[in-house]
Amino acid sequence: MSTTQFDVIVIGGGPGGYVAAIRAAQLGLKAAVVETAQLGGICLNWGCIPTKALLRASEINHLLHNLDEFGFAADNVRFDFTKVVKRSRKVSAQLSAGVSHLLKKNGVTVVNGFGRLAGTQGTLRKVSVTSDGGETIVTAPNVILATGARARVLPGLEPDGRLVWSYREAMVPTELPRSLLVIGSGAIGVEFASFYRNMGAEVTIVEVADRILPVEDAEISTFARKALEKQGMKILTSAKLGRIGKDGDSVTVEVTAGGKTQSVVVERVISAVGIVGNVENIGLEGTAIEVDRTHIKVDPYCRTGEKGVYAIGDIASPPWLAHKASHEGVMVAEQIAGRTVHPISPLNIPGCTYCRPQVASVGMTEERAKAAGHKIRVGRFPFIGNGKAIAMGEPEGLVKTIFDEGTGELLGAHMVGPEVTEMIQGYVIARTGELTDAELKETVFPHPTISETMHEAVLAAYDGALHI
């Protein structure tokens, strides 16, 4: 057993953990990252990045089968599904290697193994790291817990590696299933549904809530559902699962929705019903750290109940998003270094779903704004009124803005359509900078761009839209 001392130890090398370590090192702190698997975490290796590579391939497949509108013809269009999957893994591997390079460049020590809190040594906190090589004790006055989360598993729907998949199996199939059932319609479920449908599979989505993408504004959710159904997806909401049977190379699931029970027979099932924080076996016992439904309770500065111990990313409070984890990592590192920091407002964190059409949002939904007592003005602008969207052949979309009538504050912005995940940042900057309708009305948007829909949606809230 060997012991090494640092200023800060980060347990977990995902988008929150490795960013926290890099920022700490930039500020002159001696930092270490403890990681038991691949650097980059779930996001880079099994989530955000490889799914976007897969979705890009599916978008190309969709376009190749719809070339006539643009005056093109292609015969015998086909794809090699093995190569599609292989490319997504190559992208992840490249970026994981990039994280390793960044850590090395910034002088961050990477300790390979499973890390857990192991008590104190004077003013220092001990972290035990176990691996095949035995146990190492590393110490620091500050520890950042960034162990992330894993997929929630429903009883009877445990991933078996063949018929029932979690996100991991869904990312590396050996062949394209002809049909599949996606259970859960949050961002993960809808993205997989979109990928497989665009690749040619028959897809059914089952959601226990009364609408898909339940955290989004209801109007945007309805728009997205109609678009997905237009593509041939079957969507069952307010649904309950019944008996699940496996037979050879298929799965039969009883689903009750709309007062009717039906048996859905598919080749594969994807379970996408949320996440569970990785709080087990990391040494929380005997500390003042509190856990609420598998997630560590933290204050606005990501401090736990234990002095010198912080928690960021998916192991801590929602929203459970990679960019939120990274921002928290920077905030905590700067806090440890003695800098003045500001808490992150959840209402200023954008949410993105990369289905076709994409969905993006920031701030309050219309329902939430009303519930909070705001008297609101709502603006809407459809992509069909935008020249660039029509020229692109993608006129299906909607931008919705919500303002406080009295102050002009932008309470929320919600978008569905092509590339809205790239555009939402404009509204995020507006909310972070506390811009009002006055500044947004006067902002000049370039023409022709689909971002002009954002301006029109602001004008529409004040009865000034020009192109609808």
Image (cartoon, helix red, strand yellow):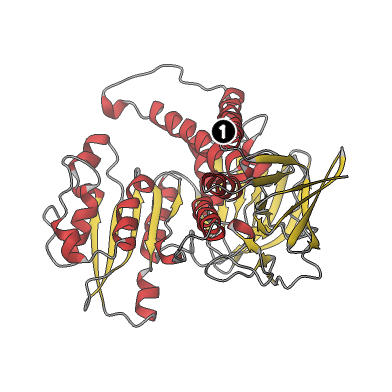
**In the image, what residue occupies the spot 40% across and 65% down?**
218
Going by the numbered disc 1, the residue's amino acid type is: Lys
Q: Is residue 196 visible?
A: no
Total label count? 1
Q: What residue occupies the far top of the structure in this picture?
A: 75
**In the image, what residue occupies the spot 31% across and 26% down?**
68
Q: What residue occupies the far bottom of the structure in this picture?
A: 373
Q: Is 326 situated above or below 36?
A: below
User: Which residue corresponds to mark 1?
Assistant: 105
Left or right of residue 322, residue 183 in this image: right
Looking at the image, which is closer to me, 74 or 276?
276
Looking at the image, which is closer to me, 44 or 211?
44
Q: Quadrant of the N terminus?
A: top right
**In the image, what residue occupies the spot 39% across and 46% down?**
357
Q: Quadrant of the C terminus?
A: bottom left
Looking at the image, which is closer to me, 142 or 129?
142
- Please state the horizontal and vertical placement of residue 121, each as a whole percent of the image: 80, 61
Q: Is residue 214 visible?
A: yes
Q: Quadrant of residue 74?
A: top left
Alpha-carbon neighbours of circle 1 within 10 Å: few (<14), some, or many (≥20)?
A: few
- Please state the horizontal and vertical placement of residue 407, each as a whole percent of the image: 22, 76
Q: Quadrant of residue 462?
A: bottom left
- Please state the horizontal and vertical placement of residue 111, each as a whole percent of the image: 73, 41
- Element type at mark 1: helix
Q: Is 32 situated above or below 303?
A: above
- Please state the horizontal and vertical placement of residue 205, each as a whole percent of the image: 55, 53
